[in-house]
Structures are given as C-alpha cells and as structure tokens.
Amino acid sequence: MIDDLEISNALLPVGFCDVLPSDAETEARGLQKMMNIFANYGYDRVNPPLLEFEQSLLAHAGKGIAEQTFRIMDPETRYMMGLRADITPQIARIAATRLINSPRPLRLSYAGLCIWVKGARHSAARQILQTGIELIGIDNAQADAEVILVTAQALQALGIQAFSFDLMMPQLVQAIIGPENFTSAQLGALMRALDRKDVAAVKYYGGDYSDILTAMLQAAGPADQAIGALRKLDFPAEAQRLFERLLASVKAVRNQDPDIELTIDPVEFRGWDYHTGLCISVYADGISGEVGRGGRYLSNNQEPACGLTLRPDILLQRAERPLSKSRVFVPYDCHRIEELSKLHEEGYVTLMSCAVEGDPEEEAHHLNCQYIYKKGKLFPL
C-alpha cells in the first residue's frame, strides 16, 4: 500500500505507460508515414471503436483473442462489452457488414490502440499500438505478395532497412500426418515436438511420418534453400497443393522485389488457429521477437482475406528519429498570426510569450528556444 499520494498518483497499472515528448511526436510522425504508404497503394483507412459488444468482437476470427480481451458490462444495455485486443477481427466485421456492397477486392488500412490482459513474451506492454492492412475478397498468390510488398514499403518509410518475412503454411503438417492416424496423446506429443523443433522427439513420435517431418523441420531457413529441400519430398496430394501455393506466393514477391528477405518455416503452426493459408511473421534487425504478423483467413461472411498487422510502438525503437524543429520565441505583442504562419511553413516552431513583463531573452532561454523573433526577423540566441 502506498501512502504518499503524490507518488501514488503517478503510478500506472503494470504494462501501461505515458508516452512523453519527444517519443509521442516520433510515434505520431512514424505512424503517419506508414499510413501514407498504405494510402498510396489504395488502402482506405477505417477507424473501428476501441470498445464494442463482446458478441461481435469475439465472433469468427475474434475467437482467437478471447483470452486477451478485457470485458466490462455496458450500464446502458446490460450487455457485456470487450476492449479490443486486436483490430483485424473488427476489420473483418466492417467488411462483412457496413462495406458488404463495396467493390472487391476491398483494401482497408487501420491504426489504433489495443489493450491486452497480459503482455507478450518479448514485451510486458499491455497497451499496444497496431497498424496494418487487409486485402479482402480475393484468394491468390498475387494478393499474398501484395500484402508483403506494401508492408515492406511501410517499414522502409520508417528508415528500417534490415527486415525479413518468415512464411509458414500451418495446414501443411496436418495435410501430411492425418490426425486420425494418431491417438490424442500421440498427436499432442508430436505437435509439442514440432513446436519445440526437437528433431529427436519428432523422430520418436512421428511414426511412419518421422522422415518427412524431420526433413521439413531441417529445411527451415532462407526461402530458396528451404524450397530446394522441400522439392525433394514426396508430399501427399493436399500437402502438395499447399506447397505449390507457398511457391507461387514466393515467386509473386520475387517478381516484384527480388531483394526482400524471405524465410520459410514449413512446420510452424503455433498461434495461427483461425488462419486458412499462408501465414507471415515480420522480424526487424536488432528487435527481439515479432514486429508484425498476419496471413490468410476468412472474413466474417466467409470471404477470403489476407492482411498484416505491425507494431509501430516496437518498430519505432529502431526507426530513424525525426529531426527536431528549431524553436522560436515570440515576445508578447510582437507578432501577427500571419507572420507566425509563415515561420511554420518554413519549418519553425513558435512559442508565444504570455508574460506582459520580464526579459524576453531570459524566457526564451528558459524554454529552450534557438531563436527570438523581433521586428519581423529571427535572431539566434
């Protein structure tokens, strides 16, 4: 129990923090750069509410975030509501309801805060910032590639040059082993072994599939290397179809930007419960853990969709920080608004004095200004 009121009023719940100058400005500018890229590629911005009824928020794709969702009761309707933990399910709802008659493919972008019940493994943060894009109403390799390519442009706009996209096809393992061929205990042990990338355990629990699963496990790595190893495997028909789609998506990316770093993990499946095809994790040099994730899924009305969600709050730790603007002190009653507007257009920040008396230069130094404005001119301090 904290008795000091002055101290306790500054405390926040675990996982929440104030974003102060100049971090808040850096965040706002970086976010706008990303949104501008999305807009350049035809992704129209939508802004769903932070809070909505639990029934709609946790339906369809939203089921996957139920455990991370704060719930409260609406005092007006007595219905349960949830604070969003992810914006993607809300985009799926909007596409299937309010924008159901909009031309397809539908391109939407978004940015906003989300609230988690508990922080992720690589971060204790529970209030997070998300931005991303969703391409809805089309299911082909070119659509998969577009989401990757546009996201790459957004990362570059932040000044982040070293990043990679890790590609997965979670249904591939299921198509190979046929879960009905294992007891629930055997299947659980095998999936844990694959999740942990434990080659010895995969060989032990894999039965007739141990050789192909081990080869897939060991194939993980740079896309070209992984594809070369996977081409040598004799996949059953459904698994071969999934593999061909993975190849097509990689080719579509390479055709437009051969320099994007792609890796493949053919046995990864954890955390992709509602996804229906290609899945994507985004990594950036110098940042631990994912900075983005997404992939192919079905929207609320069973429309095919593909999207990627990024974490600007994490990315901006490595992004280029914007240059600070020079600050100009404007003494009391020494200006007209149109004069200051001209300074703003030239890239200056103006601070107008509210003091009728006092030394203007002393106040300017106190406010960390680089210039003082006198008689229509700037004078350095």
Image (cartoon, helix red, strand yellow):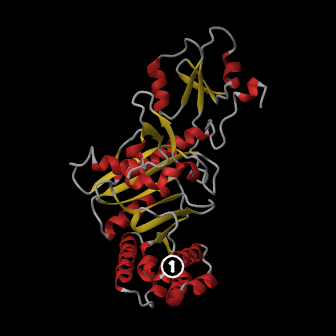
Q: Which image quadrant: the C terminus?
A: top right
User: On the rendered image, what quadrant is the N terminus found in?
Assistant: top right
The answer to whether one can see residue 39 in this image is: no
Q: Position of residue 112 (x, y in %)?
A: 47, 43
* Extreme-top residue of the structure: 357
Quadrant for residue 327, please give it.
top right
User: Regarding mark 1 in the picture, which secondary structure is present there?
Assistant: loop
**Left or right: 314 in relation to 41:** right
Q: Nearer the viewer, residue 236 or 353?
A: 236
Depth check, front residue: 69 or 161: 69
Look at the picture and state if 268 lies above or below 150: below
- Would you identify the image quadrant in which residue 79 lies? top left
252 or 72: nearer the viewer = 72
Q: Quadrant of residue 364?
A: top right
Q: Where 298 sits versus 42, above or below?
A: below
Figure check: 169 above or below 125: below
Q: Position of residue 53 (x, y in %)?
A: 40, 40
Left or right of residue 381, residue 304 in this image: left
Which residue is the site of mark 1? 183
Q: Neighbour class for label 1 at 10 Å: few (<14), some, many (≥20)?
A: few
Q: In the image, what residue type sits under mark 1?
A: Thr
- For image coordinates 38% across by 50% down, the residue present is 59
| Foreground pick, 279 / 312 | 279
The residue located at (55%, 79%) in the rendering is: 186
For residue 124, say whether it is visible: yes
Q: Residue at x 74, y 24 (%)?
A: 6
Residue 15 in picture, x, y percent from top left? 64, 44
